[in-house]
Every structure is written in C-alpha cells, then in structure tokens.
C-alpha cells in the first residue's frame, strides 16, 4: 500500500511529461489524445490503491494454496466489475475516456472489497485453528 502511494505520488509529479510522451506518435503530437489519456489516468490512479490491496490479498491467498478462490476473484474482476460496469457507464457517459477511467476505478475498488473480506475470513480461520491446536496440546 505504501509503495502504491509513493508510486502514484511520483506519477502525479511527472504526469505532464508522461502524457506528452504517450500523446506523441509518428504523426506528431495530439493534444486531444493527451486529454483523453489524462481523463483515464486520473480515475485509474485513484483505483490503484484498491488494486494494490487486491494484489496483496491475491498473493496472500496464493501463498496459502487457495488457487480456486483466486480464480473466482479474477473472474469477478473481469466479468462482474469490468465488462458490465463499462457497458453501463457507456450508456450514461458520452465521453468514452471518462467512462473507461471510471470503470477502472470502480473495478479496482470493487474487487478489493471481496478480496479483503475473504482474506480477513481466512486469517480468522487460521487463528481459530491455531488457538484450537494450542488448547488441545495443553
């Protein structure tokens, strides 16, 4: 989480420099494309904290060998929090770049919630199991 906050802060500091790089192609500099990138970046960067928590949770579950749960969470991320959200947003927001940025924000924070709940539940189960083992051995 701390690394994500530092990285986002750094990206905001060099934001204009990066946008100029991505808005330049073989045909030259495109100011309207730069603004589209900026719209997506603002929302997506806010969602980076959610995806960082999700990544930590997924890594925790994978470390415990819970691959089926991580498969379900990744499925949810794409087929519940990304594709349907983008479809709905495109019905109400005419600017595609803004809709895409908001979709990433909703998706990243949306998948963070079930991942955090599952990780907290897993930790609780592991602690209860450890406490039961300690009680039996006494």
Image (cartoon, grey):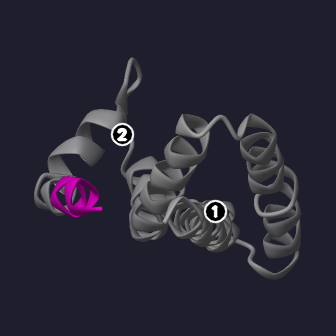
* CA gap, disc 1 and disc 2: 45 Å
Element type at marker 1?
Answer: helix
Please state if 137 lies on the left or on the right of 117 as rendered: left
Return the residue at label 1.
122
Q: Which residue is mark 2?
A: 23
Q: Is residue 25 magenta?
A: no
> 128 and 114: which one is in front?
128
Residue 68 shows in the view: yes
- Would you say residue 4 sits in the magenta stretch? yes
Query: In terms of depth relative to the viewer, which is nearer, 34 or 83?
Result: 83
* Stretch in magenta: 1-8
Kindly state the secondary structure of the residue where label 2 is placed.
loop
Q: Residue furthest top?
A: 26
At horizontal 39% and vertical 60% (from top left) the residue drawn is 38
Q: Position of residue 46 (x, y in %)?
A: 41, 71
Q: Nearer the viewer, mark 1 or mark 2?
A: 1
| 10 Å crowding of disc 1: few (<14), some (14-19), many (20+) | some
- Residue 80, label in figure: none
């Amino acid at each position: 989480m701390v690394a994500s906050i530092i990285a986002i802060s750094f990206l905001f500091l060099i934001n204009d420099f990066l946008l100029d790089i991505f808005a330049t192609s073989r045909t030259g500099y495109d100011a309207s494309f730069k603004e589209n990138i900026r719209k997506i970046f603002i929302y997506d960067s806010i969602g980076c904290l959610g995806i960082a928590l999700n990544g930590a949770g997924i890594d925790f579950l994978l470390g415990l060998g819970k691959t089926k749960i991580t498969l379900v969470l990744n499925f949810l991320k794409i087929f519940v929090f990304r594709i349907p959200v983008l479809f709905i947003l495109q019905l109400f927001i005419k600017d595609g770049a803004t809709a895409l940025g908001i979709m990433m924000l909703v998706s990243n924070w949306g998948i963070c919630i079930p991942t955090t709940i599952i990780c907290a539940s897993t930790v609780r189960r592991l602690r209860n199991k450890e406490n039961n083992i300690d009680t039996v051995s006494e």
